[in-house]
Structures are given as structure tokens and as C-alpha cells.
Image (spheres, coloured by chain):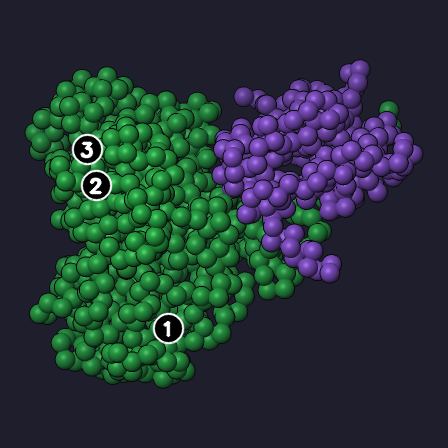
């Protein structure tokens, strides 16, 4: 045998550069974060001739070298002709939108906002922040409302997705975020996924849960639809839509009843057990079987598996939250985790899967009407005093309106008169679309700030073109509290500017016009300076997270100081409630707001598909639309036979509020009696059908349950698809 | 559990139980050349490029698929191994278009490979037509040496959808879809995690291809 010779590193080793082929050699490779869902996958964008030609996943958490179709192939919207490039103003109602320079457009917007505030008070203004924008930009938006204008009328789209999770988690545990992390998926013995089509909506997490199940974790899926994870589940609880609180209530009740709950955990770390137990007694397995349609034996097995596991994690999404009793649904999951003692240890926990790339951050930054940044309640006098001292300006006392309430109030006495939208398209995203259109027409001023022309654009009085995620600096916070840097790949197109710059410009002008605080306080040099202010005002949460550390370290909040790596598992020592104990609270089940009837016999549930994103503004302007070009509604074969519908046939879906035309997909993914419609198609909007019934606590709309009728569409004229 | 002590190229290595000889070599800072091995996909033991010699063992073993054992004496670069790797690389280069595979080209140089000494380049694999059946990426199997990473990324390793398998046997085995179905008719979810791990550029985003072709014209 020969003697050892010196070595050179192998160029394709996975430890070296990522796999790279010299078909095209990149001008630059930019490390940033995917703009789609809340997983927050880290990506390398390969750029040549000012075009992204390849997207590669980075190794390491949260995505460990994997991506999904949206992140990898769905960035075409960046160069779409619909990108907004110049500020536009409409001088008076009825006039055309005309191009204007930035100064003119900003002066116009600020003077109109100031005039309405002077006439009708600051609460006549409404500020919609964005879970697509950075932490810095969300911070500025709520600061604009609270400091420059003097109202708590600020909200963002989490109102429509996880506001019920936030409400229930905050009151029970004192923290509204995933208690554990995505890195821990492999550490769970039991994984309970409820009301989440994870495979399609958080595909990278979905694939990891699937892999964990292959490697021995016991997977329980609670979902009326046969979603991707239901196919690989060890135990699939196919409950009737809207009966989640009964299912989880019965699981918790069974554990206590059978003495299989974590008595030590409940005694040491929880409060309110007696009151909860009195409320839970009615949820017997028999009652649950009758109500949910899931056999009692399956509910019992799910409960026992969950409680007996060394570590059991629960994950949930819109199927739990988007109900008129969404807060109770989440509360039922929390109660179950508390009585089973599945909190405060690795691989366990309560984990709401957040939808938007920065929806966690938008909430953390206080883009909510009832809390300041850091979830500090507006109603607390001491909290208001603190923010007054920080911003040097008097703080309004009453919490603001939620976004859903604000749209309801338009046109009413003392209602909202002006709305400033940052990256929000209420026409496609709010329920009961015709109602929203009517409301927008009644507004005195609508400012639309977006990267792309959207459905709300025609109603705008001021259009402010914004820079996309690939054209600015800042931070996103993903679903498991990981704060990550984004970096510019390109210059913004035309005159588009970062949202943060625009908001700060408006802030400076409004502070001056309304004489609130120092207008100089709005002269930020850039996102990093805004972030430094966030660190200063929320030292316990973000004090240790600086841009310099984010360059070289993985950090998540809470991260109180420079040496802290950020806390992964929350609640190991205590909950964040005043008593440091978890609160068990009654989670009474109520039937859905609108029951099916003879005229509208089916239940409509809405949601997302793998290839598209929310209102479709981004995904339908990319290659993704070729893979999923048109609206398909899932119809169970039994219903298809009953209503004379064939697979691939055009159908009408009609509710009490309107109708849409769609293509039927006859599949047993949807249970009998339920049709499922994706929300991505503005011209066939599922939200024309949904109703404006709201959860009383969180004001989340009931997107997951509306009574509809299904009929074959016999005509073939496209005109018939017009406004119904 | 106690660590496993072994010697790699003269370095004493303390490997964790269950680690492979490749892991042990990397602990010592010794790079063993690999082609098919990938940490994420779990692909291993196919290309035979990472073969190493173990004293007292009759024949070379693949480092990526052999568990480290106490007191082994491992050599990763010997003349015999170099000859073996050279042949492996030459045969790959004969039947595959490696023009976009910078890594393997470097290895071909490093091991002074001369594929032509065996024969002229073999046509049957090199002349396969690129498969363009979806809006996102192209499968140009003329550039594929069947490392199987894409198959493992699609199935067990990462995504768990098993849209790919091998078609053909032995020498003729190539990755593909069952019954050669177009990808949209398979369980494929177009995550592109196959493309992520493809070392040869056989799987390539459409955007990259059109950019490359635009650049040529």
C-alpha cells in the first residue's frame, strides 16, 4: 500500500459551495429569505443580467436544504409588467389616476389624511400594515398611527388568519407564538396536526413531518378533508367541519376522566382547573362521536397517544382558527396540551403554523389595534405612559378597531373615512366581497401602497409603488420566532421605494401637520436604525438581536442580550402570565354561524393550494399559474352524483351572498356534504360566497363554514362568469 | 456510548458510534472524493468513488457506507485507489456529458483520467433528448450519471413523494418517472429538491436554460 498523499478539498463536497453548474455563471449570489409562507426558508438567489435564474435552499434550519415550488419557481412576479413604478394620485373622486412625483404624492396623501383627522378626529383614519413587509416597516406603520396621528387604528392580515390563536394563546400562556421550534419536529414521539393542510401550505414543514412519521413518530391528523398528511397519518380523525372544540374537549375530558392526564403538571403549573373541568364534563366521548362523527375509540386512542408520549407536539392552522368560534377551538387545543403536560419540553408544545413570511413579526411589532409592540396592552395605563415617554407624544386611551370592524364601520357615523393600505388587497382577502367593494367606494381617501397592481387598485385615491422583498434591507420573523435578514438583489423598478421609506416620509409630514412629536424623529437613515429603535423599546425580546449578529448567527426571540442565542423552548420555567401558570379556560362549542338548509345544503370551506398564494397577486404572476391555472372546487363523489356534476365540469357555487363559477374536481378529499374552494382567483372569488360572521373575541371571519348550493353550469358563455 | 478510535491517513480520529468512515475522515480534515453521497438525501454506496483501503481487509470499501469500527487503519489515497477512481471516472465520462459538472471535471483532472483510452464516447446515454414536460425545469438526462440523489431527495430522503424511480437495469439504469409518465402526471409537487441536489446540471431550471441559450445566440 502506498503512503498517504496530501489532499485537496473536493469541489462538490456538500460542506463547500452549494451544487453549482457552469451553464450560467452568476453575477452574484444573494442570501435572503423566501417571501412566501411563514416557514422562512433561507435561500440563495442566483442572479445574472439582473434576473434570478436559480433559487437554491441553504443548509441549516429552518429548511435544511429544501424548498417548495413557490419559493423555488415562484419569484417571477418580481419582473412582472404589473409592477407599480410611479406614484399616482386622483385629484378628486371620479377623476383619473395621474402620475405624480414622490413629494407631490406624499404631500397630497399627508394633507388629505391630516384634514380628515382634523375634521373627524384621528380615529377616522385606519392603517393596514402588512405581514409581507419587514419588522422595521411594521414598526413604522404602527408608530405612524400611534405617534404621528394618535390612534390605535392599526391592524394587519393576521386578523384574518391567526388572530384567534393570538387571542387564546395570549390569555392562557402569555405568549402568542409557537412555543417550540421547527428544528424539534424530529424529537416528537407524537405529532398532532389539526386543521392544517401542511403539505400544501407549509410544504417544507409538511415534508419534515412526513419524514418524522416515516421515522417512527405517531402522526395524528384532525381534518375533515383528506389532505396530504391525512394520507400518511397513523390516525386520521375526519371530524365534521366546525366541531374541533368538541373533539379536543372530549380528548382532554377523557384524559382527566380516565386519570391519564399529567396531574403533577396541572397542579404545579396550571390554574383554573376546577372551572374548566365543570365546563368540560359535558364533552363525553359519546357526545363527541355524535357531534364530530369520529368514532369514540379513535378519539380515545388519539387522546391517550398524545398524553402518553414523551413529547407530543401540536401544529394547527386556518382549519382551527377561521371560525366564528376560532378562539374556543384554539383554547380547546391549549387545554388539551396543558392537561396532558405537553408544554415546556423539547419536541412538545403548541405550534400555530403562521401563514405569511412575516406575520409573526407584524404582530410582534404591534401592528394590532389593542397592543403596542411586544404585545403590551393599550388598555394598561402604565404601558401607555411608557410609550408616551418613548415617543414624546400623548397616547390615545381606547384600543383601535380591528380591520374587520373598521371595514364594517365605513360609511357609518363616526366610522372610518380614510384607509392607508400597505401591501393588503381587501377585495380578495376580506369576506363577503360585494360588501367590501361597497365600503371602499364610500371612503373619502384610500391609499394603496403595493408592489403590484391588485384588485383594490381601482378604488385608490393615492397609489404608492413599493419595493419588493428582493429590493430592500430588513428583517422577517418566521413562524418559530427566528429573526432573519433579507437583502436587496436588485434596485426597485422605476420610482418604487421601500415601504419603510414611504411610511417614514408620511410620518414626518403628518407629525408636522398634526403637530405631534418631532418630525425629525422620522428621519431614519435606513432599516437598521429602525431596528435599533425596536431593540431599544423591546430589550427583553429583541435586545440581543442586532444586524451584525444576524450576519453570522441563527437568532430567535426572546433574545435579551448580546450573548443569548435566543430561547428555543418556551415555558420551561414558567408561563408568561402574571402568575407564571397556564390558565385553563372553558372552551364551549357553538354550532357554526350559518347552518346548511334545504336551499343551501352544502358546507363551503375555503383555503389554499400548493401552487398559489392568498389573493394570487404574487403567485399568479409567475410560472406557478401554468401549473394551476384556474379555480377548481373539490366535490365529494356522492355530492357530485346527487347534484349531477361530473369531474371537470363547470359548476355554479351559490351562497346567500353571491355566486361564482368554477370547475368541479370530483374527489374524496372533500367529505360528503362539503365543498372546498381555493381563495386565489380574484375573478372567481371564493370570498364572494363567505359570510361576515366573526369570532366575538378575535373578530376573525368564519371562512371555513358557509352554506352553499352546487349546480352544474349548463351554459358555456364566459359572460356568465361576470359579477354574480 | 464511547467514541470509536481509528486511524485515517495516519491521523488518530475519535468518531461517534454509528458514523461512517467518510465522517471519520472528515473529522480528521481528510477529504475523500464523493459523487453520489449526499447528507440530506441519504444517497450512498453507489458510485464507488469514495472507496478506501482498510488494513487487513481484502478489498477496498466505500467510505460513505462503511461504519467506523475501533482500531481500523484506513488509507484514503493510495496508488491502487487512485487507479480505481480513475477508471470509475473514465467510465462515467465516456457515457455522460459532463460539460456542466465542474466538480467531476476537476476530479477527472486530478486523477489524470483519459476516457478515450477505453473507446470513443458512448452515444446511447449521451444522446438522450431533454425532457421538457412541466413549467419549471428540464430533465436533461444526457448529463446524468445516475447518482440517484434526485430519486432519494424525492422519496425517502427529503420530500416523501416518490415521483422518480430508476428505469432499466444494471448499466442501463437511469432515473425517470414510472412508465415514463410526464412529471405532472406523477405525484411530483415540483419542489425542485431534486434539482437542488443534482451535481451534474442534468436537472436545470427553465429560467437558467433559457438564459444560457440566450447567452449563446
Which quadrant of the rendered structure holds the C terminus of chain B? Answer: bottom right
Q: Is residue A117 left or right of residue A130?
A: left
User: Residue drawn at (53%, 29%), measured in percent from left and top?
Assistant: B162
Chain ID for green: A
Above or below residue A61? Residue B173 is above
Above or below residue B87? Residue A483 is below
Distance, label 3 to label 2, CA atoms, is 21 Å
| Labels 3 & 2 near each other (Cβ < 8 A) | no
Chain ID for purple: B
User: Residue drawn at (63%, 61%), measured in percent from left and top?
Assistant: A48
Q: Which residue is mark 2?
A: A709
Instruction: Give the number of the mark in front: 3 or 2.
Output: 2
Distance, label 1 to label 2, CA atoms, is 40 Å
Q: Which residue is mark 1?
A: A464
Badge 3 crowding class, 10 Å Cα cut-off, few under 14, some 14 to 19, many 20 or more, is many
Instruction: Please report whichever mark, 3 or 1, sits nearer to the chain's N-terminal start.
Output: 3
* Residue A426, label in figure: none
Amino acid at each position: 500500500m502506498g503512503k498517504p498523499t496530501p489532499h485537496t478539498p473536493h469541489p462538490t463536497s456538500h460542506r463547500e459551495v452549494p451544487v453549482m453548474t457552469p451553464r450560467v455563471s452568476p453575477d452574484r449570489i444573494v442570501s435572503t429569505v423566501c417571501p412566501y409562507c411563514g416557514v422562512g426558508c433561507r435561500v440563495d438567489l442566483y442572479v445574472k443580467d439582473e434576473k434570478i435564474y436559480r433559487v437554491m435552499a441553504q443548509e441549516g434550519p429552518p429548511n435544511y436544504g429544501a424548498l417548495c415550488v413557490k419559493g423555488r419557481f415562484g419569484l417571477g412576479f418580481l419582473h412582472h409588467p404589473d409592477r407599480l413604478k410611479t406614484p399616482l394620485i386622483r385629484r378628486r373622486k371620479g377623476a383619473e389616476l395621474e402620475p405624480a412625483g414622490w413629494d407631490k404624492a406624499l404631500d397630497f396623501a399627508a394633507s388629505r389624511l391630516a384634514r380628515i383627522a382634523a375634521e373627524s378626529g384621528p380615529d377616522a383614519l385606519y392603517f393596514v400594515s402588512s405581514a409581507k413587509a419587514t419588522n422595521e416597516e411594521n414598526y413604522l406603520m404602527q408608530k405612524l398611527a400611534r405617534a404621528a396621528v394618535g390612534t390605535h387604528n392599526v391592524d394587519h392580515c393576521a386578523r384574518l388568519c391567526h388572530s384567534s390563536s393570538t387571542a387564546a394563546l395570549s390569555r392562557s400562556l402569555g405568549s402568542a407564538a409557537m412555543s417550540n421550534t421547527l428544528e424539534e419536529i424530529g424529537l416528537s414521539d407524537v405529532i398532532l396536526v389539526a386543521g392544517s393542510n401542511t403539505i400544501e401550505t407549509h410544504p417544507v414543514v409538511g415534508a419534515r413531518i412526513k419524514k418524522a412519521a416515516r421515522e417512527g413518530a405517531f402522526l395524528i391528523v384532525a381534518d375533515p378533508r383528506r389532505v396530504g398528511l391525512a394520507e400518511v397519518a397513523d390516525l386520521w380523525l375526519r371530524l365534521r367541519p366546525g366541531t374541533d372544540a368538541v373533539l379536543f374537549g372530549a380528548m382532554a375530558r377523557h384524559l382527566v376522566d380516565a386519570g391519564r392526564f399529567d396531574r403533577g403538571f396541572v397542579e404545579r403549573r396550571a390554574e383554573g382547573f376546577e372551572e374548566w373541568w365543570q365546563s368540560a364534563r359535558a364533552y363525553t366521548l359519546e357526545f363527541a362521536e355524535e357531534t364530530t362523527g369520529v368514532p369514540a375509540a379513535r378519539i380515545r386512542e388519539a387522546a391517550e397517544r398524545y398524553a402518553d408520549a414523551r413529547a407530543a407536539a401540536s401544529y394547527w392552522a386556518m382549519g382551527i382558527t377561521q371560525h366564528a368560534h376560532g378562539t374556543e377551538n384554539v383554547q380547546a387545543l391549549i387545554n388539551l396540551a396543558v392537561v396532558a403536560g405537553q408544554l415546556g419540553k423539547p419536541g412538545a408544545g403548541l405550534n400555530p403554523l403562521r401563514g405569511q413570511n412575516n406575520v409573526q413579526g407584524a404582530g410582534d411589532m404591534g401592528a394590532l389595534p389593542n397592543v403596542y409592540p411586544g404585545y403590551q396592552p393599550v388598555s394598561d395605563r402604565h404601558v401607555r405612559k411608557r410609550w408616551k415617554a418613548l415617543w414624546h407624544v400623548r397616547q390615545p386611551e381606547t384600543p383601535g378597531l380591528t380591520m374587520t370592524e373598521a371595514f364594517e364601520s365605513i360609511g357609518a357615523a363616526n366610522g372610518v373615512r380614510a384607509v392607508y393600505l400597505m401591501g393588503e388587497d381587501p377585495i380578495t382577502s376580506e369576506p363577503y366581497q360585494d360588501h367590501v367593494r361597497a365600503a371602499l367606494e364610500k371612503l373619502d381617501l384610500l391609499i394603496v401602497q403595493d408592489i403590484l397592481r391588485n384588485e383594490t387598485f381601482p378604488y385608490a385615491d393615492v397609489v404608492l409603488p413599493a419595493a419588493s422583498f428582493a429590493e430592500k434591507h430588513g428583517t422577517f420573523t418566521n413562524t418559530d420566532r427566528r429573526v432573519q435578514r433579507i437583502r436587496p438583489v436588485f434596485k426597485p423598478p422605476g420610482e418604487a421605494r421601500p415601504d419603510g421609506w414611504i411610511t417614514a416620509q408620511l410620518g414626518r409630514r403628518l407629525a408636522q401637520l398634526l403637530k405631534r412629536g418631532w418630525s425629525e424623529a422620522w428621519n431614519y437613515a435606513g432599516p437598521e436604525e429602525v431596528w435599533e429603535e425596536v431593540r431599544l423599546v423591546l430589550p427583553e425580546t429583541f435586545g440581543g438581536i442586532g444586524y451584525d449578529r444576524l450576519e453570522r448567527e441563527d437568532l430567535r426571540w426572546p433574545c435579551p442580550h448580546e450573548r443569548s442565542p435566543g430561547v428555543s423552548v418556551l415555558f420551561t420555567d414558567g408561563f408568561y402570565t402574571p402568575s407564571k401558570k397556564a390558565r385553563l379556560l372553558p372552551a364551549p362549542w357553538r354550532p357554526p354561524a350559518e347552518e346548511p338548509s334545504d336551499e343551501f345544503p352544502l358546507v363551503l370551506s375555503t383555503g389554499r393550494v400548493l401552487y398559489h398564494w392568498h389573493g394570487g397577486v404574487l403567485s399568479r404572476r409567475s410560472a406557478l399559474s401554468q401549473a394551476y391555472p384556474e379555480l377548481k372546487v373539490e366535490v365529494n363523489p356522492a355530492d357530485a352524483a346527487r347534484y349531477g356534476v361530473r369531474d371537470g365540469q363547470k359548476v355554479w357555487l351559490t351562497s346567500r351572498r353571491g355566486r361564482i363559477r368554477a370547475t368541479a374536481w370530483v374527489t374524496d378529499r372533500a367529505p360528503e356534504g362539503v365543498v372546498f374552494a381555493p381563495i386565489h382567483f380574484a375573478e372567481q372569488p371564493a370570498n364572494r360566497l363567505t359570510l361576515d360572521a366573526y369570532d366575538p373575541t378575535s373578530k376573525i371571519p368564519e371562512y371555513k363554514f358557509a352554506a352553499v348550493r352546487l349546480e352544474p353550469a349548463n351554459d358555456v358563455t364566459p359572460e356568465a362568469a361576470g359579477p354574480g | 456510548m464511547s467514541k470509536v478510535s481509528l486511524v485515517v491517513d495516519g491521523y488518530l480520529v475519535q468518531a461517534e458510534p454509528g458514523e461512517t468512515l467518510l465522517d471519520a475522515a472528515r473529522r480528521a480534515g481528510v477529504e475523500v472524493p464523493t459523487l453520489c453521497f449526499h447528507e440530506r438525501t441519504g444517497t450512498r454506496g453507489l458510485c464507488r468513488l469514495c472507496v478506501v483501503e482498510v488494513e487487513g481487509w481484502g478489498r477496498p470499501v466505500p467510505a460513505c457506507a462503511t461504519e467506523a469500527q475501533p482500531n481500523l487503519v484506513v488509507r484514503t489515497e493510495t496508488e491502487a485507489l487512485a487507479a480505481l477512481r480513475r477508471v470509475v471516472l473514465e467510465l462515467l465520462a465516456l457515457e455522460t456529458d459532463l460539460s456542466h459538472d465542474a466538480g467531476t471535471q476537476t476530479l477527472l483532472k486530478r486523477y489524470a483520467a483519459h476516457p478515450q483510452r477505453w473507446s470513443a464516447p458512448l452515444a446511447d446515454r449521451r444522446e438522450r433528448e431533454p425532457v421538457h414536460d412541466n413549467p419549471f425545469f428540464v430533465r436533461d438526462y444526457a448529463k446524468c450519471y445516475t447518482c440517484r440523489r434526485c430519486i432519494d431527495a424525492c422519496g425517502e430522503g427529503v420530500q416523501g413523494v416518490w415521483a422518480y424511480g430508476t428505469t432499466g437495469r444494471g448499466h442501463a439504469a437511469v432515473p425517470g418517472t414510472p412508465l415514463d409518465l410526464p412529471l405532472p402526471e406523477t405525484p411530483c409537487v415540483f419542489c425542485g429538491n431534486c434539482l437542488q441536489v443534482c451535481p451534474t446540471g442534468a436537472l436545470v431550471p427553465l429560467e437558467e436554460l433559457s438564459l444560457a441559450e440566450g447567452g449563446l445566440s
